[in-house]
Amino acid sequence: TGAIMKNLFLCMLISLSVISLYGQTNNYENLFDYNRGASVVDFSSNYEGGWDVQLLLENTPRDFREGLPAWCTEDGAPFPHHATVELGKTEWLDIIVFNNQIPDETGGWEGISAKDIEVYVSNASAKSGFKHVVSFRLENNKNHQVVKITPVQARWVKFVITSNYGYDGYT
């Protein structure tokens, strides 16, 4: 039984090593970061200025004096709204975190926050080869909303907003 236990321990040790090398950890990097080579390559509409679509990315170099570091659509732009991000290289995705909290939601633009979201990924191009990954509803005016997805590789990620919380002009 000593030899059996030794072999079982060795198998367990190998399995734990594989899990630690290839499994999920709590050490995530933001792949939607300008400094990592991410860029917005396609979008449906854009308010520009302090609410430019490029502000979807972490560390986008911008002057925020005009407004919040957030994306806003053009006034009256019809649903759905979309933005496609090209990552610096093909990456594995398994968690996406959304920040949907802005002072505008309680400061005269109630219902402006994104509500229903669809996510698509492609390894072909910024315009084709997309497959649906997940659909979900964001909570109104809340940051750090974690969406776990089945791990998938992607070079391009398209976010589609199919509704907001009721504001007619902007999202």
Image: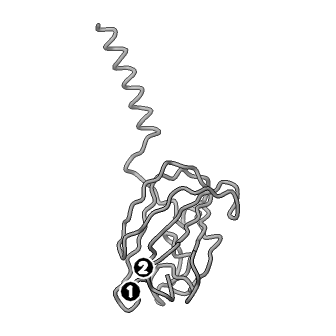
23 on left or right of 52:
left
Near mark 2 (Cα within 10 A), the count class, few <14, some 14-19 or many ≥20, is some
Near mark 1 (Cα within 10 A), the count class, few <14, some 14-19 or many ≥20, is some
Compared to residue 89, the image places residue 47 above or below, namely below
Residue in front for this viewpoint, 21 or 95: 95
Q: Quadrant of residue 36?
A: bottom right
User: Would you say the residues marked 1 and 2 are in contact, meaning their CB atoms lie under 8 Å apart?
Assistant: yes
Q: Quadrant of residue 121?
A: bottom right
Report, in whole angstroms, how far the alpha carbon at label 1 lies from the one at label 2.
8 Å
Q: Position of residue 133 (x, y in %)?
A: 54, 55
Q: Quadrant of residue 132?
A: bottom right
Q: Secondary structure at mark 1?
A: loop
Q: Secondary structure at mark 2?
A: loop
Residue in front for this viewpoint, 65 or 81: 81
Compared to residue 152, the image places residue 38 above or below, namely below
Residue in front for this viewpoint, 125 or 164: 164
| Outermost residue, left side | 1
The residue indicated by pointer 1 is: 110
Q: Report the colour scheme.
A: one colour
The amino acid beneath tag 1 is Glu
Q: Position of residue 126 (x, y in %)?
A: 68, 63
122 on left or right of 4:
right
| Outermost residue, bottom side | 108
The residue indicated by pointer 2 is: 165
Of the numbered discs 1 and 2, the one sitting upstream in the chain is: 1
60 on left or right of 127:
left
Q: Which residue is drawn at the image coordinates 41% and 74% (left, top)? A: 100
Q: Which residue is drawn at the image coordinates 50% and 58% (left, top)? A: 134
Res 93 label:
none
The amino acid beneath tag 2 is Tyr
Q: Which quadrant would the N terminus be assigned to in this image?
A: top left
